Image: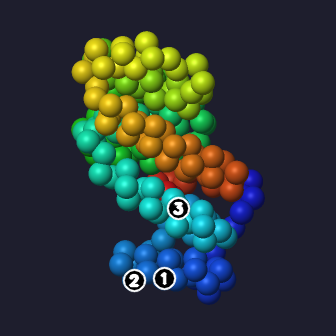
């Protein structure tokens, strides 16, 4: 059930209207989640800024999509799972890669360690220890990547939680537009 409705720029608060109009001018349309976030100019701006920043992470795109799938599976956002499944396929992930990522693991032990860490950042960050960081470094992950995973988990929590609270559900049309 839909809990928050999407807004057209004419119905949005002034700052959100400005942001939505700019996106429409550049891209021709605004996705469902973004137009629904327009209820809060602060949330909308924060989401867009974090999303842009996380596009500059040093993780390869396929691994970033695996991470999103692991986190979204745990959160339970069908809209995000659909979007990241499509994006994962576009990034070259196989069906096995997608299935394993949704389980928080991968065939590659190095990637599996990072995916398990991402899920723990979401589910139990207070339980992470210095030994966990040492384990990630022993798998070859840098402090930069460890920090960026926290950012990616945060972005995925924001989108997944927002979609669930707003009641945004996956559709049969372009799922990438939902986000």
Q: Which quadrant of the view contains residue 157? A: top right
Residue at disc 1, secondary structure: helix
Q: Which of 159 and 2 is in front in this view?
A: 159
* Residue in the picture at 57% in, 69% down: 35
Q: Mark 3 points at which residue?
A: 46
The answer to whether residue 110 shows anywhere in this view is no
Graded by Cα atoms within 10 Å as few (under 14), some (14 to 19) or many (20 or more), the crowding at tag 1 reads some
Graded by Cα atoms within 10 Å as few (under 14), some (14 to 19) or many (20 or more), the crowding at tag 3 reads few
Q: Looking at the image, tell me whether mark 1 or mark 3 is earlier in sequence order.
A: 1
Q: Mark 2 points at which residue?
A: 25
Residue 68, compared with residue 56, is above or below; it is above
Q: Name the residue under label 1.
A: 21
Q: Which residue is outermost to the bottom?
A: 10
Which numbered mark, 2 or 3, is in the foreground of this view? 3
Label 1 to label 2: alpha-carbon separation: 6 Å
Contact flag, marks 1 and 2 (Cβ < 8 Å): yes
Question: Measured from the top left, where is residue 178 in percent x and y?
Answer: 51, 58
Q: Looking at the image, tell me whether mark 2 or mark 3 is earlier in sequence order.
A: 2
Which numbered mark, 1 or 3, is in the foreground of this view? 3
Q: Nearer the viewer, residue 174 or 64?
A: 64
Label 1 to label 3: alpha-carbon separation: 17 Å
């Amino acid at each position: 059930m839909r809990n928050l409705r999407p807004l057209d720029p004419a119905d949005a608060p002034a700052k959100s209207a400005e942001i939505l109009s700019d996106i429409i001018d550049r891209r021709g349309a605004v996705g469902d989640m973004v137009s629904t976030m327009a209820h809060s100019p602060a949330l909308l701006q924060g989401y867009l800024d974090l999303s842009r920043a996380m596009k500059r992470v040093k993780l390869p795109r396929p691994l970033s999509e695996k991470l999103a799938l692991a986190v979204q599976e745990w959160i339970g956002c069908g809209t995000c799972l659909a979007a990241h499944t499509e994006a994962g396929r576009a990034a070259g992930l196989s069906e096995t890669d997608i299935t394993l990522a949704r389980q928080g693991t991968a065939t590659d032990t190095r990637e599996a360690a990072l995916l398990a860490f991402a899920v723990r950042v979401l589910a139990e960050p207070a339980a992470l220890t210095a030994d966990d960081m040492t384990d990630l470094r022993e798998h070859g992950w840098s402090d930069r990547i460890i920090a960026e995973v926290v950012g990616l988990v945060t972005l995925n929590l924001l989108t997944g939680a927002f979609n669930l609270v707003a009641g945004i559900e996956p559709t049969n049309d372009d799922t990438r537009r939902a986000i």
